[in-house]
């Protein structure tokens, strides 16, 4: 794990976006050509092993990694977006935050029934976003083949929300 170049580049920003949160800033990884290629290549191989038909990325840092993974695998990419961003016919899933709720949405034609979908995001924290993404895909008749994240904050226990799914993470804190 420690040999991954990106692990030394992820930057902690304390008290962002609110007091008490330590934000894992991945922008130093994105601007480092070798680190960027290394993480995209490793995430691609994890995704490939899950035999997906399509890659879904969670807005917005899931787009950054999901799109090159889809291209590497010769697959299409579908976005899972925040409330109110998608223009077409869509479905929504709400999930709880510490205070309040968030909503993610997908176009109803994003996934065909029976398709295997790998969900990509930059970071697994509590798992609320990822499990809402899984519910969207399953409501559309898709199968969640697994999840691929760059970072996992293991102390938040997000995996327990994703029990029964394959979950790959490259860097754990
Ligand atoms: P969760 O639903 O709690 O698993 O949160 C995951 C989503 O929130 C991902 O899209 C992350 O990009 C973002 N996120 C949550 N916590 C952090 C953090 N400490 N640093 C950076 N991003 C975070």
Image: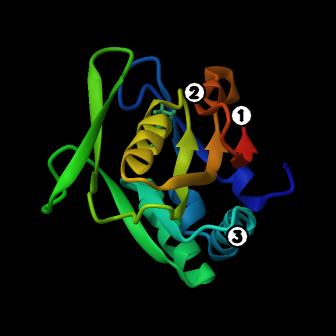
Q: Where is residue 33 in the image (x, y as percent from the top left)?
A: 63, 76
Question: Which quadrant holds the C terminus?
Answer: top right
Q: Is mark 3 on a helix, strand or loop?
A: helix
Using the rendered view, name the quadrant where residue 104 is placed.
Answer: top left
Rendered residue at 66%/54% (across/down): 9
Which residue is disc 2 drawn over?
161
Q: Is disc 1 surrounded by few (<14), some (14 to 19) or many (20+) residues within 10 Å?
A: few
Label ID, residue 28: none
Number of labels in the image equals 3
Measured in 3D between alpha carbons, the distance from the residue under mark 3 to the one under mark 1, in whole angstroms, is 25 Å
Query: Does the residue at mark 3 contact the one at mark 2 (Cβ under 8 Å)?
Result: no
Q: Where is residue 31 in the image (x, y as percent from the top left)?
A: 54, 69
Nearer the observer, 89 or 26: 89
Q: Is residue 33 above or below residue 91?
A: below
Q: Name the residue under label 1.
A: 173
Residue shown at 44%/46% (left/top)? 138
Percent across and percent down for residue 124 are: 57, 38
Q: Is mark 2 within 8 Å of ligand 1?
A: yes
Checking the image for residue 48, the label placed there is 3
For the residue pair 35 and 63, the one nearer the viewer reads as 63
Horizontal side of 84 relative to 24 (left or right) equals left
């Amino acid at each position: 794990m420690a040999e991954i170049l990106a692990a030394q580049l992820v930057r902690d920003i304390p008290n962002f976006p609110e007091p008490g949160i330590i934000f894992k800033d991945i922008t130093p990884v994105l601007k480092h050509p070798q680190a960027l290629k290394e993480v995209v290549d490793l995430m691609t191989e994890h995704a490939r092993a899950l035999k997906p038909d399509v890659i879904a990325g969670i807005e917005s840092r899931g787009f950054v990694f999901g799109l090159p993974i889809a291209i590497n695998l010769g697959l299409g990419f579908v976005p899972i977006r925040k409330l109110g961003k998608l223009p077409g016919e869509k479905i929504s899933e709400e999930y709880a935050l510490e205070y309040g709720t968030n909503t993610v949405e997908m176009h109803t034609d994003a996934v065909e029934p029976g398709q295997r979908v790998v969900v990509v995001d930059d970071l697994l924290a509590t798992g609320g976003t990822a499990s809402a993404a899984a519910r969207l895909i399953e409501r559309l008749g898709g199968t969640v083949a697994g999840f691929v994240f760059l970072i996992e904050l293991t102390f938040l226990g997000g995996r327990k929300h994703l029990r029964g799914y394959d979950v790959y993470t490259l860097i754990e804190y």
